[in-house]
Amino acid sequence: MFEIVIASRNKEKKKELKALLRGLKIKVLDLSNFSAAPKVEEKGKSFQANAKTKAVTIARFTRRLTLADDSGLEVKALGGKPGVRSARFAGKGTAYAANNRKLLKLLSGVPKSKRKAKFVCVIAIADKNGAVKTVRDECHGWISFFPKGRSGFGYDPVFVYPKYNKTFAELGPKIKNKVSHRARALKKAKAIIQKYLRRYL
């Protein structure tokens, strides 16, 4: 069976990506299947740069088609922050809750009308020779005044999706995986994967 590798060690992200890849006739692996895989530092200044670096590095190491995602939150009132530093907004290795606390503190006193935000996701797909393609999508919403919901990860408890007026953490995976930035980007990425499937199968 055709194999694809998810270039991530993030447990929640891997679970979400695997769920979104269902329906394709492929075997989905991740970095837990390659204990010696290099750890890729996210030093790029854009989501695209980080995603491409991860995908190419892991594809060359595993000699398999590789999917890498780089995503984050951009808040208009904060000039686009936390952006590419979303995962380490409150410091390297900090918990999701710490990032959310910092975000809400910075937005203290900011009215709802000025709390607009968007989740951005760039997915890169690289083959064993280093050829890489990227897709990007976004999901727009606003930042709540306090965390709500128990599902999801990252900024899900504070990102409100307007259609339901609920945070991603309140919506749960079934709905989130239909409307999120990652779901939208992966829908585009599936078309690229299908081309590889037609070529190799």
Image (spheres, rainbow, N blue to C red):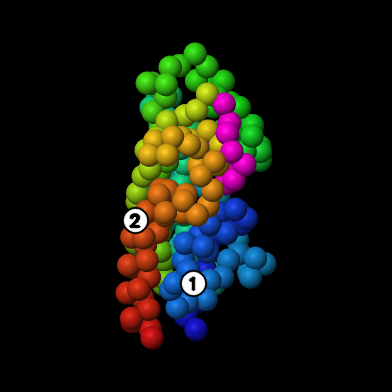
Q: Residue at x 54, y 48 (%)?
A: 172
Bounds of the magenta segment: 146-155
**Disc 1: which residue:** 4
Report the quarter where the C terminus lies: bottom left
Name the spot of residue 93 as percent of width and height, x first: 66, 40
For the residue labelled by badge 2, is the local secondary structure a helix, a strand or a loop? strand
Which residue is depicted at the point 57% across and 46% down? Answer: 152
**In magenta stretch: residue 37:** no
Q: Residue at x 38, y 21 (%)?
A: 114
- Decide: marks 1, 2 in contact (CB < 8 A)? no
Does the image show residue 201? yes
Horizontal relation, residue 43 to residue 192: left or right: right
Residue 135 is labelled as 2
Is 16 placed left or right of 83 in the picture?
right
Q: Amino acid at mark 2?
A: Val
Residue that lies at the very extreme toward the top in this rendered image: 109
Prevailing secondary structure class for the magenta stretch in the rendered image: loop
Q: What crowding class fits label 2: few (fewer than 14 Cα within 10 Å), some (14-19), or many (20 or more)?
A: some
Q: What's the amino acid at mark 1?
A: Ile
Which residue does the image show at 33% across and 82% down from the upper left? 199
Which of the labelled discs sits on residue 118, or is there none?
Answer: none
Image height of 29 relative to 141, above or below: below
